[in-house]
Image (tube, grey):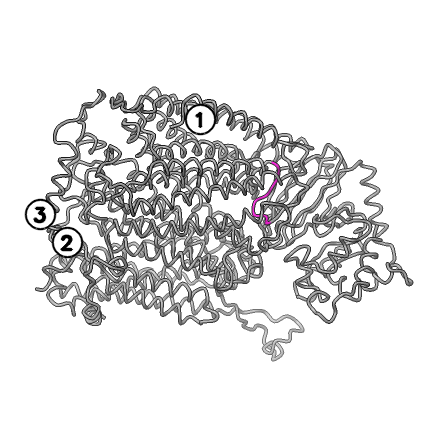
């Protein structure tokens, strides 16, 4: 039996430690921390967490306190054989502790319902539309009005509302940028919507939140919120890249561009911006007939991206990570479709040489 | 030893009621699946293409009659009339088997359904080339064809399996009444003919489920694509 | 068929030995079946624990390669399935089996052979589900196995087939047991034991059993539809045919949420037995506790969509399910308050079972509060599918169910084995497990709110998740060590534990009125019940609210009478009709087992194996139905 003073001292120490740990842990600076909100929508979720969280902490302290107090206070003393009063219950008490939690819950339920309807309301007309498509295991972002299709990096202008249409090409995924919005599932049969208005510029980490197969852990992406001018420049740059002719000559880039076509990369990866609607339809039908391999990330402005392999590695300007990725994708991201489907990875006879890898890398990095 | 129970209800009878309650949820989920996918098929054939309400009405009537025959069998065994009992029980089996025959016929018909199509100008179909204005093409329904096929065959198939189990059960009782000798006489008439009572409960349940399926799938189902 | 049956019955003479391995294989004694359930489930508990340790090792540091992503997905899937279906449910079933007849004053369950069948199907189902480790891969899609990831072409191995067939088989076992317990509880109570005099554990078993027989058919349909999609190309959850994968989620969670209460209500029942015993006070608000248990059972059906707040079901649906989910906190809270009311003013005997029971209450409060936090759909958008939810379910199912199961084990151990466990070792186990548990799972709340999704096999060190992951891993190994203390204590007790009296804890309910361990017939004389806590009133009288004093003719004399009766007749000639041993339950279960493999491997083995298995099952069922339930004394007429 532990002596009583030690016991209550221990409890105080525990509470102090818990408080310290909580402070240590709610670090808003962490990349995917939900304790920092960069949009009014995320702020609402954070407010709700604060209301319910503090209510929970209060209930926790009171109930747990009474429980521990009761056990210590009424612990049987040694050789004490007296019989306690045999109470069977107490109706006013029962009514009391039915009503009290009901009131607390009602207090929580009101903002909950208000926010549910608020977050599902229609976004403003001038919102930026983006169609998000989840693939095993990467993200496709299509800006229909801007005529841009890109992958794994969602660029948004600051302070402009965004309306996302969420679709899936295969299984269920979940779109989650913790600092910008709560997660919404990405489902092959239903088109979901999500709206938010990013209010801070910066780079936001994000990742798939619904288990979607072997490379689920590596299905990440970034949201880059920038000034409207920067965003417009990015769009213009994209169109410039889409119409830029492939490099010619003996340079590494030119060799890489040739390899990109001759080694089958073009079967799945587009580099000329979004094709026309008909061309895209033809591509999709090609996929369905099994003539084309698989939808893969559009690489038109690959050189502008900060990451590669769905937010997994830094896209360093020296190309070190890119070369590692091109040499053995499965080593970097186990289970990825490219290693499973591309001839250069499944046919030992057509393996890429180190030179070819660096030429391809040079070409891809030049796409900026 | 006479069994005494707290509620007065026999253990096995209570078990049967609980099982039927549980089975309600089983069929409930299958019917719910059917209803959720009603009209969601991407391609035909649709219910109105294949259903023949008159035929299914007849088979439904046959199954209803089997319930009546079951009641008569139960009443016969309660009176200790073994001969009448066997006759009515066998007729129940026969009616149940007839229902299953209808179902097999229906499944076969659906799977081999055909439809008449008008010849289009320039069509390469042999009949059209031969100068006909219409020709027949396969328009069969299988579980793989569309959501209607998937849900229809699963729901009615599981019901058919229940009927099959019932027929085997009743046949076993008939067989036992012949082979089991005096002991069978005693067992079958024991405790308000409990073993027949349980089989009857099951049989009526399967029957009622069919009424629901008939109403939901056939009667309401037609006309919605 | 019948003559064949008779011939076979003659050839396979009815087993008669009450000793040796065959006596266990053919047993229909609820106490032996309870022990079989307990031992088997505990082994599965250890297996699932090892799976958890492997995952924690992989996640101890960022970017580790202890196991491959594929193995990691099999580990988290099998850890959950094993803990839920092969550890917690059967461990509570062990208590149902051993204790329910004793607590209601019955000599066995209503259907002893069906009871044996439940056990054998459970055992074979557990082996079936786990055999993916040997044959071509275990299920790898998470325990809720979301379609269409679980379908072609995204999942081509046999893992999901093991999932489907394993759960179908295990569902049969659970349902058979649940039918049995409902009939037993409703029909076999000792005279005078009205419904409102039943121990709360019996009540919770009843509610749980109803949940099982109503919830399992729903998942059965879901599993059958998935099986058909995978093996016959139907379109239930296949978008190519217009099928909606979200339907699987509905079917799964309509089952899955009641399943949560199937796991927690028996735990609440155990706690409601232990707290009064060790406080020397009746349960505070017995009627309210029972009623709130029933209400939880009902409300459990109306909240399934709170697992689907992020699916996009619309504002109205999310609002309704948010409020319904919050409302379920009210009856849960009432139970907690009544437990505290039971302790309040009592004379609390701080023994190991009491510590585990109080541990349950304290941890369940945390699990309940985090549950309310994601009952709010918008707040859940940040918590769903993160480690916050992992923390929550472990506070409910480990801090809740497992702590309560250990409380029950320490409490009923003397009744089951006739020996006491060492209380000091028990307390050491409690504190080690309590600390290990909180060190493992509390940090997961932070991890979740820091944005760590669940089911990822690794993470980047830039995310700020390093610290709490290593802490959780250390805690997990600490917890594992605490389980070793328990195993040591249990083994030690069986060899040289103090011999238990019939009533070592000054108990209140009927199981404490008979010897430890109970004789095969349980009660020499079926007791007459006059109120709640019949054993307590026999010992102390029950004159309402005043402090009771021990009365004459108390417990010890009743035991003496029981012992005398047993001695008089001897164990074999006690003159009480007991159900005979039977081969058929294990044979029928074996048939299902074979058929299960046939279903999984039908492509390589054709349908022959499934048909053979089914054939074995049908023959067993026939033989069974012609085998009299009781030993044949007078049937040769």
Q: Is residue B16 magenta?
A: no
Which residue is depicted at the point 58% across and 41% down?
Answer: C469
For residue A101, above or below residue A282: above
Q: Residue C621 lies in what quarter of the image?
A: bottom left
Secondary structure at badge 1 equals helix
Residue B48 seen from this side: no
Disc 2 chain ID:
B
The correct choice, above or below, for A229 with respect to A188 in the image is above
Rounded to the nearest angstrom, the CA distance separating label 2 from label 3 is: 38 Å
Which residues are the magenta region?
A: C450-457
Identify residue for label 1. A64
Instruction: Give the labeled residue for mark 3.
Output: C568
Q: Chain of mark 1?
A: A
Foreground of the two, A363 or A41: A363
Asked if the residue at tag 1 contacts the one at tag 3, i.e. Cβ–Cβ closer than 8 Å, the answer is no
Residue to which mark 2 is pinned: B192
Q: Secondary structure at mark 3?
A: helix
């Amino acid at each position: 039996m532990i002596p009583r003073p030690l016991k209550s001292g221990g409890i105080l120490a525990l509470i102090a430690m818990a408080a310290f740990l909580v402070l240590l842990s709610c670090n808003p600076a962490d990349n995917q921390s939900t304790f920092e909100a960069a949009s009014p929508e995320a702020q609402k979720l954070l407010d709700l967490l604060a209301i319910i969280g503090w209510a929970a902490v209060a209930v926790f302290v009171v109930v747990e306190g009474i429980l521990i107090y009761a056990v210590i206070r009424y612990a049987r003393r040694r050789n004490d054989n007296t019989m306690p009063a045999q109470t069977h219950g107490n109706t006013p008490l029962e009514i009391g502790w039915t009503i009290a939690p009901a009131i607390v819950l009602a207090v929580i339920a009101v903002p909950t319902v208000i926010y549910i309807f608020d977050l599902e309301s229609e976004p403003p007309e001038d919102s930026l539309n983006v169609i998000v498509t989840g693939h095993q295991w990467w993200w496709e972002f299509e800006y229909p009005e801007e005529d841009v299709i890109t992958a794994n990096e969602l660029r948004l202008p600051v302070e402009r509302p965004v309306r996302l249409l969420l679709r899936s090409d295969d299984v269920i995924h979940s779109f989650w940028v913790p600092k910008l919005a709560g997660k919404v599932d990405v489902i092959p049969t239903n088109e979901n919507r999500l709206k938010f208005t990013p209010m801070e510029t910066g780079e936001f980490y994000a990742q798939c939140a619904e288990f979607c197969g072997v490379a689920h852990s590596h299905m990440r992406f970034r949201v880059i919120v920038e000034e409207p001018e920067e965003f417009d420049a990015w769009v213009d740059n994209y169109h410039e890249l889409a119409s830029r002719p492939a490099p010619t000559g003996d340079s590494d880039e030119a060799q890489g561009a040739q390899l990109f076509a001759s080694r089958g990369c073009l079967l799945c990866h587009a580099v000329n911006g979004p094709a026309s609607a008909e061309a895209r339809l033809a591509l999709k039908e090609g996929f369905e007939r099994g003539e084309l391999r698989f939808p893969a990330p559009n690489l038109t402005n690959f050189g502008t991206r900060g990451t590669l392999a769905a937010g997994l590695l830094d896209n360093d300007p020296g190309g070190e990570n890119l070369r590692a990725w091109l040499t053995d994708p499965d080593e970097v991201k186990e289970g990825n479709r490219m290693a499973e489907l591309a001839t250069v990875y499944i046919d030992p006879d057509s393996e890429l040489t180190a030179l070819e890898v660096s030429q391809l890398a040079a070409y891809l990095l030049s796409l900026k | 030893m006479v069994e005494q129970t707290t509620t007065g209800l026999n253990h096995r009878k209570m078990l049967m009621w609980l099982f039927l309650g549980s089975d309600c949820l089983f069929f409930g989920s299958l019917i719910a699946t059917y209803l959720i996918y009603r009209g969601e098929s991407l391609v035909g054939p649709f219910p109105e293409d294949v259903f023949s309400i008159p035929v299914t009405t007849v088979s439904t009537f046959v199954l209803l009659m089997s319930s009546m025959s079951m009641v008569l069998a139960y009443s016969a065994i309660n009176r200790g009339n073994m001969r009448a009992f066997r006759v009515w029980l066998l007729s129940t089996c026969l009616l149940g088997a007839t229902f299953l025959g209808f179902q097999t016929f229906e499944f076969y018909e659906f799977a081999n359904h055909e439809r008449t199509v008008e010849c289009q100008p320039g069509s390469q179909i042999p009949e059209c080339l031969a100068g006909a204005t219409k020709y027949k093409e396969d328009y069969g329904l299988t579980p793989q064809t569309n959501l209607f096929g998937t849900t229809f065959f699963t729901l009615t198939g599981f019901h058919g399996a229940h009927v099959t189990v019932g027929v085997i059960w009743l046949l076993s009782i008939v067989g036992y009444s012949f082979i089991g000798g005096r002991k069978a006489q005693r067992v079958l008439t024991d405790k308000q003919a409990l073993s027949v009572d349980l089989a009857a409960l099951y049989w009526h349940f399967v029957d009622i489920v069919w009424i629901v399926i008939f109403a939901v799938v056939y009667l309401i189902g037609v006309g919605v694509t | 068929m019948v003559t064949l049956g008779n011939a076979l019955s003659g050839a396979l003479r009815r087993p008669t030995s009450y000793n040796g391995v065959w006596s266990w294989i053919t047993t229909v004694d609820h106490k032996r079946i309870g022990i079989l359930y307990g031992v088997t489930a505990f082994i599965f508990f250890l297996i699932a624990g090892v799976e958890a340790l492997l995952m924690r090792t992989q996640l101890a540091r960022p970017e580790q390669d202890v196991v491959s992503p594929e193995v990691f997905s099999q580990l988290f899937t099998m850890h959950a399935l094993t803990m839920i279906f092969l550890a917690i449910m059967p461990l509570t079933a062990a208590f149902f089996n051993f204790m329910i007849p004793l607590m209601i004053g019955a000599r066995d369950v209503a259907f002893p052979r069906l009871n044996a069948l439940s056990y054998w199907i459970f055992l074979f189902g557990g082996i079936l589900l786990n055999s993916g480790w040997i044959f071509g891969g275990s299920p790898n899609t998470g325990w809720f196995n979301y379609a269409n990831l679980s379908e072609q072409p995204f999942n081509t191995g046999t893992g999901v087939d093991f999932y489907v067939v394993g759960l179908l088989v295990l569902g049969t076992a659970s349902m058979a047991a649940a039918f049995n317990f409902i009939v037993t509880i409703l029909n076999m109570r000792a005279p005078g034991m009205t419904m409102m005099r039943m121990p709360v554990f019996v009540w919770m078993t009843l509610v749980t059993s109803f949940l099982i027989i109503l919830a399992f058919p729903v998942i059965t349909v879901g599993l059958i539809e998935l099986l058909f999609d995978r093996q016959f190309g139907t379109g239930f959850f296949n978008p190519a045919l217009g099928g909606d994968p979200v339907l699987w989620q509905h079917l799964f969670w309509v089952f899955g949420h009641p399943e949560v209460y199937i796991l927690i209500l028996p735990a609440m029942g155990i706690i409601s037995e232990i707290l009064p015993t060790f406080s020397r006070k009746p349960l505070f608000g017995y009627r309210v506790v029972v009623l709130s248990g029933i209400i939880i059972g009902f409300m459990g059906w109306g909240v399934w969509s709170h697992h689907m707040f992020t699916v996009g079901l619309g504002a109205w649906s999310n609002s309704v399910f948010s409020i319904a989910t919050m409302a379920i906190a009210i009856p849960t809270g009432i139970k907690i308050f009544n437990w505290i009311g039971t302790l309040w003013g009592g004379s609390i005997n701080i023994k190991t079972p009491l510590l585990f029971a109080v541990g349950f209450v304290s941890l369940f409060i945390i699990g309940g509060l985090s549950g309310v936090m994601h009952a709010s759909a918008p707040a859940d958008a940040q918590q769903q599918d993160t480690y916050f939810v992992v923390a929550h379910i472990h506070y409910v199912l480990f801090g809740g169910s497992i702590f309560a199961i250990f409380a029950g084990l320490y409490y009923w151990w003397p009744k089951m084995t006739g020996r006491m466990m060492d209380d000091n070792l028990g307390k050491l186990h409690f504190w080690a497990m309590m600390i290990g548990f909180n060190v493992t799972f509390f940090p997961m709340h932070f991890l979740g709110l820091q944005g760590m999704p669940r089911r990822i096999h690794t993470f980047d060190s830039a995310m700020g998740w390093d610290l709490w992951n290593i802490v959780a891993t250390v805690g997990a190994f600490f917890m594992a060590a605490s389980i070793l203390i328990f195993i040591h204590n249990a083994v030690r007790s069986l060899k040289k534990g103090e011999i238990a009296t019939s009533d070592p804890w000054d108990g209140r309910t009927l199981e404490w009125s008979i010897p430890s361990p109970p004789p095969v017939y349980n009660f020499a004389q079926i007791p007459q019940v006059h109120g709640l806590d019949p054993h307590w009133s026999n010992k102390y009288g029950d004159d309402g609210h005043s402090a009771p004093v021990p009365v004459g003719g108390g417990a010890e004399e009743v035991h003496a009478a029981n012992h005398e009766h047993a001695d008089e007749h001897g164990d074999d000639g006690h003159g009480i009709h007991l159900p005979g041993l039977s081969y058929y339950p294990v044979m029928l279960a074996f048939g299902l087992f074979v058929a299960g493999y046939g279903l999984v491997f039908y492509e390589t083995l054709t349908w022959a194996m499934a048909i053979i298995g089914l054939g074995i099952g049908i023959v067993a069922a026939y033989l069974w139905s012609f085998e009299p339930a009781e030993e044949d004394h007078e049937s040769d007429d």
